[in-house]
Amino acid sequence: MIAKRPIIVVALACAAGMCGCQGGDNSGLNIAMMLGDAGVISSDEARYMQAGLNVAGKAWELEQLTPENEHYIGRAVAARLIARFGMSENGNATRYVNLVGQSLAMGSDMPETFDGYRFIILDSDDVNAFAAPGGFVLVTRGMLRVCKSEDALAAVLAHEVAHVQNRDGLNALKNSQFWGTVAKEGLNVADQNIGALTEAFNGLIDQFVDQIIVKGYSRDAELRADRDAVTILKRVGYNANSMIAMLDELQAGWKPSIGMLKTHPSPDQRLAKVRPLVAESKPAPHVLARQKRFNQAMNPLLAQQTEH
Amino acid sequence: MRKTRLLLAAAVTCGLTTATLIAADQMTVQVKRTQVRDTPSYLGKLVAELRYGDRVTILEKGPAWLKIQSKLDSGSKTSGYLHKSTLTTRQLTLTAGTASQVDASEEELALAGSGFNEDIEQRYRNEHRDLDAAFEALDHMRGSAIFNPKPQDLRAFLAQGGVEGGER
């Protein structure tokens, strides 16, 4: 009788799992709780199962993050950057940057994130741009100053959108010890887990900010973002040659923040990779309307300097 | 006994792993809100709005867009296209702050909150009051037209600038 019981329970559990699949209900989760309550499996095993992990506590997989999880990570990173650099209050410039940016997001492989892309102008004369999970893209006033046209701005924003679609920020943190905490504590926000999850979140945000401001992504990730930016520009209809113009500008002797120097391959290296991708494009006509609206939106913003 | 327990545990895990996916032709909306269109393009006409957790039936799969069928609030069915980035095969749990049409029992809500969500953010904010202004600015963006241009505004913007959807 005792020997037969586990087999029957196994069969019921499998059936419940399958029924849960078809009916879309929580019968599988309930089985795990029942088995835990009955002492057939330990409470740790029940918790792991509820979290969709195997009983050995398999390492956290980035694919388990939902777009909602990515959104909250991205929000916290964006909040840290806004607090550090300040945010521009120029509504016209911000509206314009969002019109260009959202158009590019539409042409990417990840056009929709949990709560949509946000394009934010940071109140800094450093030349830099950042992408956070969930679609938060932040560019400094200093970077906008280097762009001389709407197509150049599109090139910068397309590169950042590519980082979002490629999940480069999260991939760079794949080996963070904080994922281990999440795997161990499980995904359910029960009272006993929330402290540890909050601590893990805290640690991850610190590491993320450090990654994008100081360390940067891998050379491969940066060159891939350039390549994907060309694809996005072509899909939307912007002039892909603008990538070359932007990289020429960056090479020509600007004063980058320390972060930019450390975190990106040199413009020359990037140009070498981008030129062949663009060579086959038809040169797009210079459109006066685009230049006019770029100047209208940017000139008042760029007249400002950050007070030190 | 240990071997039996491991076997049992493995079986339940297999069942649960399957249970975390839904039926093969069904997917769930994984973004806060999205628009079903009459063609596989963001230029397509709006057919319906769906929200996080809404279920759809997949009719056809393209490389980037899926043709879906969905039930409206009225009970009638509608079909159209969604970009694949909006959908998942996972059975999503509801989180406390997420708007959804699906009625959730208290137990479901108690089980919900997979990983990092609004609750975790609130705790993070409580520990980082120096970020109050920044988070408030982010909150304000949610309802701001500046940060949320409508698709028709984007179409007009691109058209005015002579930006025409180009090579793939």
Image: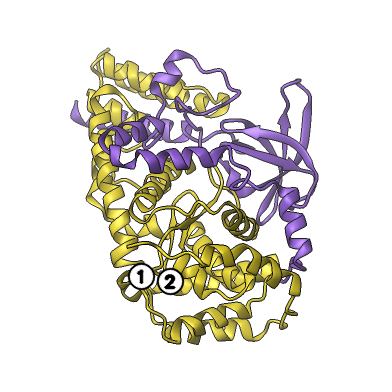
Which numbered tag is attached to residue A33? none
* A22 vs A130: above or below: above
State the residue in front, B136 or B97: B136
Lateral position of residue A56 relative to residue A166, left or right: left
State the residue in front, A301 or B137: A301
Quarter of the rendering containing residue A155? bottom right
Per the image, the residue denoted by label 2 is A222
Q: What chain does badge 1 belong to?
A: A
Per the image, the residue denoted by label 1 is A218
State the residue in front, B120 or A183: B120
Do tag 1 and tag 2 residues touch (Cβ < 8 Å)?
A: yes
* A3 vs A107: above or below: above
Could one spot residue A205 in this view of the protein?
Answer: yes
Which residue type does callout 1 highlight? Ser
Which residue type does callout 2 highlight? Glu
Q: Residues within 10 Å of mark 2 (few under 14, many from 20)?
A: many
Looking at the colours in the rendered structure, which chain would you say is drawn in yellow? A
- Residue drawn at (44%, 51%), measured in percent from left and top? A133
Lateral position of residue B90 relative to residue A150, left or right: left
Looking at the colours in the rendered structure, which chain would you say is drawn in purple? B
* Coordinates of residue A120 in the picture (x, y in percent): 50, 54
- Residue drawn at (58%, 22%), measured in percent from left and top? B102
- Residue drawn at (42%, 31%), measured in percent from left and top? B15
